[in-house]
Image (cartoon, rainbow, N blue to C red):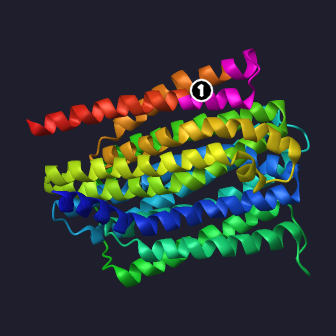
């Protein structure tokens, strides 16, 4: 029995480990942006914090649908279908979403003037929006090809590419932001240019790898798009609800002062680094549960779900302790600005408590994605972030003068409620499977 338990953990980790490295690589690309921006100036960090807070909410709608590709194709694979025929439909779908997203970002630029940001930040934010709109195609191409390969449980090469791009992005950031020889320093715009180059590089490399590694076929099937939207749309809305919930805080507090937007970006970056392991476990669980669900292997399905939750919660408990012990050190990695450090450090203690529930909720989301029950995640996120987190955070921030810390306390409370709702629904689902 103990060997069997160990098998499921080992099998999950064998798939999740390369994904963890890739996810860490992906977030380290963002960390590189924050570090270089912080070293350039607090104004630059504030501007890109506000710009990414808005653009990420727009981008995540399409990304949320595309990240359901691996779960859906894993279900198909469990049913015995040849999933290589869904390669071209997946690419076409991703590029259609990218075109729509790019147009939305461009149309949003004129509204930036009306958001009440500090006047010196507005031109930088507009330029960042413009460049990001054209980077969308590379980002979506990378996402869909990575998900397609993940459905085959091909995870090493795609994540090695991401790790390589940490250094490529950092190199380009330094060159474009500060300038070098004949290349002039472009400040915050240099960060956007570096992201554009890196996204296209990652997307094109994985596209070529798909041609080499898998037996791609031309195929059209309307039902595939229907299933992808059916699973992906609620999952996408769940991600958007969460992203907007987090990033609206940067926008609201950024109107008070740019330093709060910069602080919020640093705090999100710190949590995102540790979040990469449970996110990778979530990805692996969605594929394993998806395959087991398609093949009707109920015992394996439950085992993968339970082991995934245990690994995620265990790891995040350790990182919570690290947050509580070394808050100033962690924040100091991102900025030398003492005022910014003083804003962030008290909130890191709140993040320490948040860690455990953050790991729990993303793993639960992966389980439900594998079960093709993404509406549960969407409604749980809606209740948690918009009926609880933001209202409570707003009251604490402005009526009780907690400022940014008030919003993070609201997020912590809502994450506890979110996990409780999802655990109860998962228990109900498992009870139905016994019948």
Q: Residue furthest front?
A: 325
> Residue under circle 1?
410
The residue drawn where x is 53% and y is 27% is 413
- Tell whether 203 sits left or right of 378: right
| Residue placed most toward the observer, 52 or 361 | 361
Residue span colored magenta:
395-412
Front-lying residue, 2 or 303: 2
Quadrant in which residue 175 is drawn: bottom right
Residue 343 drawn at (x, y percent): 79, 37
Is residue 311 or residue 46 the one in the foreground?
Answer: 311
> Can residue 75 be spotted in the picture?
no
| 55 sits left or right of 318 in the view | right
Magenta part, dominant SS: helix
Q: Residue sitting at 45 percent across and 27 percent down?
A: 417
Decide: is 170 above or below 402: below
Q: Residue furthest top?
A: 399
- As for residue 413 lying within the magenta part, the answer is no
Q: Position of residue 411 (x, y in %)?
A: 57, 31
The residue at 41%/77% (across/down) is 210
Q: Is residue 292 left or right of residue 245?
A: left
Residue at 68% across, 66% down: 196
Circle 1 SS class: helix
Check the picture and name the quadrant holding the N terminus: bottom left
């Amino acid at each position: 029995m103990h060997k069997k338990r160990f098998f499921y953990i080992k099998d999950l980790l064998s798939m999740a480990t390369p994904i963890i490295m890739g996810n860490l690589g992906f977030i380290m690309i963002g960390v590189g942006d924050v570090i270089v921006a912080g070293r350039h100036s607090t104004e630059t960090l504030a501007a890109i914090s506000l710009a990414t807070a808005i653009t990420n909410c727009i981008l995540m709608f399409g990304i949320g649908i595309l990240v359901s590709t691996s779960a859906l194709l894993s279900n198909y694979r469990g049913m015995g279908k040849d999933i290589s025929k869904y390669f071209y439909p997946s690419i076409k779908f991703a590029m259609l979403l990218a075109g729509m997203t790019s147009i939305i970002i461009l149309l949003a630029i004129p509204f930036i003037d009306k958001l009440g940001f500090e006047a010196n930040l507005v031109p930088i934010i507009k330029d960042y929006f413009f460049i990001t709109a054209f980077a969308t195609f590379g980002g979506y191409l990378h996402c869909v090809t990575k998900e397609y390969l993940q459905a085959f449980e091909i995870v090493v090469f795609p994540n090695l590419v991401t790790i390589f791009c940490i250094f490529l992005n950092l190199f380009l950031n330094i060159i474009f932001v500060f300038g070098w020889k004949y290349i002039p320093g472009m400040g915050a715009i240099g960060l956007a240019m570096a992201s554009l180059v890196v996204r296209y590089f990652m997307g094109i490399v994985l596209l070529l790898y798909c041609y080499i590694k898998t037996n791609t076929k031309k195929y059209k099937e309307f039902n595939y798009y229907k299933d992808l939207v059916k699973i992906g749309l609620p999952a996408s809305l769940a991600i958007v609800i969460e992203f907007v919930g987090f990033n609206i805080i940067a926008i609201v507090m950024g109107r008070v002062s740019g330093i709060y937007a910069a602080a919020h970006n640093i705090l999100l970056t710190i949590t995102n680094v540790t979040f990469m392991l449970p996110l990778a476990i979530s990805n692996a669980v969605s594929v394993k549960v998806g395959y087991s669900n398609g093949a009707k292997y109920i015992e394996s399905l439950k085992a993968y779900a339970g082991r995934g939750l245990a690994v995620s919660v265990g790891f995040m408990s350790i990182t919570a302790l690290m947050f509580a012990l070394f808050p100033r050190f962690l924040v100091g990695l991102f900025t030398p600005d003492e005022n910014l450090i003083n804003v962030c450090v008290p909130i890191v203690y709140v993040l320490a408590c948040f860690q455990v529930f953050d790991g729990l909720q993303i793993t639960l989301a992966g389980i439900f994605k594998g079960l093709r029950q993404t509406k549960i995640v969407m409604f749980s996120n809606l209740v948690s972030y918009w009926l609880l987190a933001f209202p409570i955070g707003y009251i604490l921030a402005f009526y009780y003068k907690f400022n940014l810390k008030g919003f993070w306390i609201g997020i912590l409370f809502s994450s506890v409620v979110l996990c409780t709702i999802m655990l109860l629904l998962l228990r109900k689902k498992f009870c139905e499977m016994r019948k």
